[in-house]
Image (cartoon, rainbow, N blue to C red):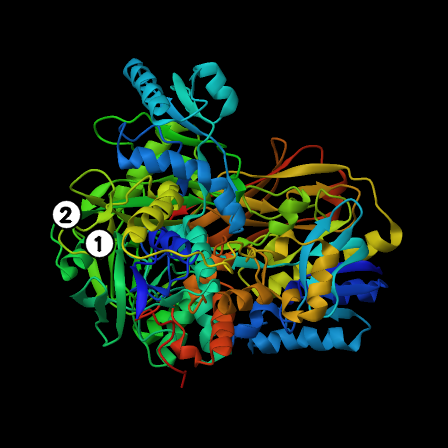
């Protein structure tokens, strides 16, 4: 049986950053990765724009990943690739995994970091009417075919969903010679970053249909056409607004979901709003000694923020492994008006340091006022010019305020609808 | 020259093919699609009916009750999962309660055992999620569930292991000759010669009969749409729940599947062709009716929706007989529900009673009806798994993360009868790609394994044969 201080599940950006920090704190670290190499989904993200916040330069996905892979290689961190974790025992902190060399085996940890990332919501979940031919791909699958395997899935494309991967793939397919006929988005706003709408759609003249969805898919063997339709406020199609596009490919970019099957099976408490674990500000879940970070915790806009969060989890996991468990004395963080979620969901008053409260808004607003209340007392009030559901916001609670928290913390925002 | 050619690779054709290999006969199955179980055996509810539904004295009633009794051993021999989970016909009105008594009496006359009428309290105890508007139910403990396409793959695979041939992508375009010397030709110029033809072409039965010169029946299509929920909903219902049948038909059902999903459906809409399009109205109807049957149906856990077309014939009963106009042509037509349940009994009858009246049957002493399970990996102990991984490292490599399917299992599906040659065929055999990501992560890897094992370029791999290619060439 192998023994480690910290076992990290997932060798993507979150797992790598957590591993480096845990090691530097003095822990013996193992990273378990199911793919052949570490780096996670960044390996297929060959476009640039990564690292602007963290490194003040624009890197490609593989370049961003390599900065961390190199740091891991410099340290005595064990990395098992092509190894899939099958289950976690949250009480004994045992991880059961499988690979071709060792078969099924167990690893003992003092602390575990969940860093499994997220997956795309599948088209199947959407109940779109019509046929189920070949040529319907999630944007990420198409990205893998194009960027990793070197194959073009199709030549005439309609994209449903304006999440970042969908936008990036609109540009990528265009550069590979495909025609992207439309990107439609059921919401009245894009969930992608503003810069991606400009650089991936506008610059290539690709039309974005907001408040539109696909209502019919045609084609027996391979998709031959789709019909899109405008939707009303309740997302119901408005008759008479149909537009038909002939195409051989439909890409779906309809949301990301933290991949928490392992956590769920292990009985770790998950949050309904984020679909990730419920955590304290040190990213410890409510299962003692189990930490979570990156997109398995909540879906981030930028990998730079994933790295930042993973470093918190990495240090905390090492502290737990080396110094033992600490009592929690916590208050809850609650999503108030116009806020869809707040993370961390719990603030532990025994932990030192300021707390960066991340939150997402429900709708686009301008001239906004962000309010943080403790109980019914307003403790912070700041202004934001524009907020959008596609972009994560945060507010800082200073260290001196943490100790004296005497009620639950509610984050709310008010402003004019855009 | 074959002794018998079975046309149509659904559960009926497959079960008959397997039954034929018990005897010293040269037999084959021809199927127009790239795999077996591509028609109504792919998209149906997977219910092993108890047998109270069919009219007394009908072929449906006879084969249903016989097939139900055979299914447990049948599935066991073929290593296919079968569960006798019981069925409930739920009443929502006083009129329905009267119908339940009639159904019970009919069932008993058909030979169904252990039927019981439950009051509302006993019903809620069995099924806590059932609508509080329910008044009672007919409980049939002999009702069960089985995976229709896995059973079809298993019967065909076992028949092939016992010497039967399989021709896929063989769409019949003409039939000539007569009993003892038929020639069946395909659109692309393939021919097979046979003494006897068994027509099990499902929705295509009329076409096959017509090509052979038999115009005695017509077949229509009835489309059914389904919604499938994630395995996380596994215990939402335990029994198969039916509405009380009315003049409008049986309505939709809410049932667990043997793999632990929840299936909702089907609608019933008559269509002109084998149209398997889902529709907005159809899916809405499924949702509305499921919500009438149960409280708080977890629609948020939908992983896919699909449609299948069931054949039905103008005689309103199964047609299982030798053609009156074409000797040597045996028609198994209009096999709608409860066809899956009836399949083992129909197969036995067709071979022992119909085929035997045309050719002498002598036992094939080397027949082995046992088929090794294809999903054996998960049933092994950890020690056994580790031993296997040592011998075949591909069993240590998880390809489908949602269903935890290894590369070894995928290779096994490609190399075992009937061989899987495309993405969907691998999915039906192994469940790779059937989980909540619906193949988003594993499809490129499964495609590469298929290409490698079959020795074809990646561009030639399809989703389900013919023009369902995955890729349009290499990138720049």
Mark sitting on residue B342: none
B314 vs B38: above or below: above
Mark sitting on residue B205: 1
Asked if the residues shown at circle 1 and circle 2 are in contact, with their CB atoms under 8 angstroms apart, the answer is yes
Q: Is residue B234 left or right of residue B212?
A: right
Mark 1 / mark 2, whichever is N-terminal: 1
Q: Quadrant of the C terminus of chain B?
A: bottom left
Q: Is residue A52 left or right of residue B52?
A: right
Tell me if residue A218 can be seen: no
Residue count near mark 1 (Cα–Cα under 10 Å), binned few <14, some 14–19, many ≥20: many
Residue B345 screen position, x and y as percent: 38, 43
Mark 2 secondary-structure assignment: loop
Residue B286 screen position, x and y as percent: 32, 38
Spatial distance from mark 1 to mark 2, Cα to Cα? 9 Å
Residue B117 screen position, x and y as percent: 41, 17
Residue B284 screen position, x and y as percent: 30, 40
Locate residue B390: give its quadrant. bottom right
Q: Are marks 1 and 2 on the same chain?
A: yes
Q: Quadrant of the N terminus of chain B?
A: bottom left
Q: Is residue A56 left or right of residue B342?
A: right
Residue under label 2, please give it.
B217
Front position in the image: A81 or A53? A81
Q: Residue furthest bottom?
A: B476
Mark 1 secondary-structure assignment: helix
Chain letter for mark 1, please. B
Front position in the image: A397 or B24? B24
Tell me if residue B362 can be seen: yes
Chain letter for mark 2, please. B
Instruction: Write the residue at 14% across / 57% down.
Output: B210
């Amino acid at each position: 049986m192998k023994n480690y201080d910290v076992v990290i599940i997932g060798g993507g950006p979150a797992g790598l950053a957590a591993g480096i920090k845990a090691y530097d704190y003095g822990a013996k670290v193992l990273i378990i990765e199911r793919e052949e190499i570490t780096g996670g989904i960044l390996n297929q993200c060959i476009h640039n724009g990564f690292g602007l916040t963290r490194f003040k330069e624009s890197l490609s996905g593989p370049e961003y990943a390599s900065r961390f892979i190199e740091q891991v290689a410099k340290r005595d961190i064990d990395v098992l690739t092509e190894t899939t974790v099958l289950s976690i025992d949250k009480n004994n902190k045992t991880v059961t995994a499988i690979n071709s060399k060792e078969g099924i085996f167990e690893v003992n940890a003092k602390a575990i970091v969940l860093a499994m990332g997220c997956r795309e919501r599948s088209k199947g979940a959407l109940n779109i009417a019509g046929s189920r031919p070949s040529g319907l791909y999630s944007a990420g699958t198409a990205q893998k075919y194009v960027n990793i395997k070197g194959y073009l899935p199709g030549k005439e494309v309609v994209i449903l969903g304006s999440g970042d991967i969908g936008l990036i793939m609109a540009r990528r397919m265009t550069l590979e010679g495909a025609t992207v006929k439309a990107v439609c988005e059921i919401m009245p706003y894009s969930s992608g970053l503003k810069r991606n709408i400009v650089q991936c759609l506008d610059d290539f003249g690709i039309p974005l249909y907001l408040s539109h969805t696909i209502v019919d898919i045609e084609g027996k063997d391979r998709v031959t056409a789709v019909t899109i339709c405008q939707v009303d406020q309740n997302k119901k199609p408005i008759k008479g607004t149909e537009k038909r596009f002939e195409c051989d490919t439909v890409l779906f970019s309809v949301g990301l979901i933290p991949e928490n099957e392992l956590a769920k099976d292990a009985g770790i408490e998950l949050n309904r709003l984020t679909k990730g674990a419920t955590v304290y500000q040190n990213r410890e879940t409510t299962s003692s000694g189990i930490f979570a970070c990156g997109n398995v915790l909540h879906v981030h806009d930028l990998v730079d923020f994933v790295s930042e969060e993973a470093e918190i989890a990495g240090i905390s996991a090492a502290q737990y492994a080396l110094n033992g468990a600490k009592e929690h004395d916590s208050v809850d963080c609650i999503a108030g008006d116009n806020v869809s979620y707040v993370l961390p969901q719990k603030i532990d008053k025994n932990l030192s340091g300021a707390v960066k409260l991340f939150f997402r808004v429900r709708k686009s607003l301008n001239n906004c006022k962000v309010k943080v209340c403790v109980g019914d007392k307003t403790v912070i009030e700041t202004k934001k010019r524009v907020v959008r559901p596609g972009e994560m916001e945060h507010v800082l609670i200073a260290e001196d305020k943490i100790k004296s928290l005497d009620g639950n913390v509610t984050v709310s925002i008010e402003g004019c609808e855009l | 020259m074959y002794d018998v050619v079975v046309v149509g690779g659904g559960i009926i054709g497959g079960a008959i093919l397997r039954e034929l290999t018990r005897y010293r006969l040269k037999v084959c199955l021809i199927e127009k699609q790239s795999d077996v179980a591509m028609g109504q055996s792919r998209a149906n509810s997977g219910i092993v009916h108890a047998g109270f539904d069919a009219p007394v004295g009908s072929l449906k009633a006879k084969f249903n009750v016989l097939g139900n009794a055979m299914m447990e051993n049948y599935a066991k021999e073929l290593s296919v999962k079968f569960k006798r989970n019981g069925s409930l016909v739920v009443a929502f009105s006083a009129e329905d309660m009267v119908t339940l008594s009639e159904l019970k009496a009919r069932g008993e006359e058909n030979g169904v055992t252990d039927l019981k009428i439950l009051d509302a309290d006993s019903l809620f105890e069995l099924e806590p999620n059932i609508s509080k508007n329910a008044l009672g139910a007919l409980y049939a403990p002999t009702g069960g569930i089985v995976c229709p396409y896995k059973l079809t793959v298993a019967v065909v695979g076992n028949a092939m292991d016992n010497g039967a041939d399989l021709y896929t992508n063989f769409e019949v375009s003409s039939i000539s000759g007569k009993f003892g010397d038929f020639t069946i030709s395909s659109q692309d110029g393939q021919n097979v010669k046979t003494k006897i033809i068994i027509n099990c072409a499902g929705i295509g039965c009329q076409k096959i009969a017509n090509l052979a010169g038999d115009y005695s029946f017509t077949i229509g299509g009835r489309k059914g749409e389904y919604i499938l929920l994630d395995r996380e909903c596994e215990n939402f219902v335990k029994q198969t729940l039916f509405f009380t049948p009315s003049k409008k038909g049986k309505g939709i059902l809410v049932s667990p599947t043997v793999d632990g999903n929840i299936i909702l459906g089907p609608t019933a809409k008559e269509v002109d062709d084998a149209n398997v399009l889902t529709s907005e109205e159809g899916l809405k109807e499924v949702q509305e009716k499921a919500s009438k049957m149960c409280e708080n149906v977890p629609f948020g856990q939908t992983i896919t929706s699909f449609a299948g077309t069931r054949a039905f014939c103008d005689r309103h009963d199964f047609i299982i007989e030798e053609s009156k106009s074409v000797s040597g042509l045996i028609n198994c037509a209009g096999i709608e529900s409860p066809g899956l349940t009836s399949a083992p009994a129909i197969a036995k009858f067709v071979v022992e009673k119909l085929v035997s009246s045309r050719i002498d049957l002598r036992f094939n002493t080397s027949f082995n009806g046992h088929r090794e399970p294809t999903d054996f990996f998960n049933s092994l102990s950890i020690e056994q798994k580790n031993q296997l991984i040592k011998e075949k490292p591909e069993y240590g490599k998880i390809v489908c993360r949602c269903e935890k399917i290894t590369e070894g299992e995928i290779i096994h599906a490609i190399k075992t009868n009937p061989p899987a040659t495309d993405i969907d065929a691998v999915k039906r055999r192994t469940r790779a790609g059937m989980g909540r990501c619906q193949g988003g992560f594993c499809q490129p890897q499964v495609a590469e394994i298929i290409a490698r094992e079959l020795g074809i370029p990646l561009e030639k791999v399809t989703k389900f044969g013919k023009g369902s290619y995955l890729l349009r060439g290499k990138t720049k």
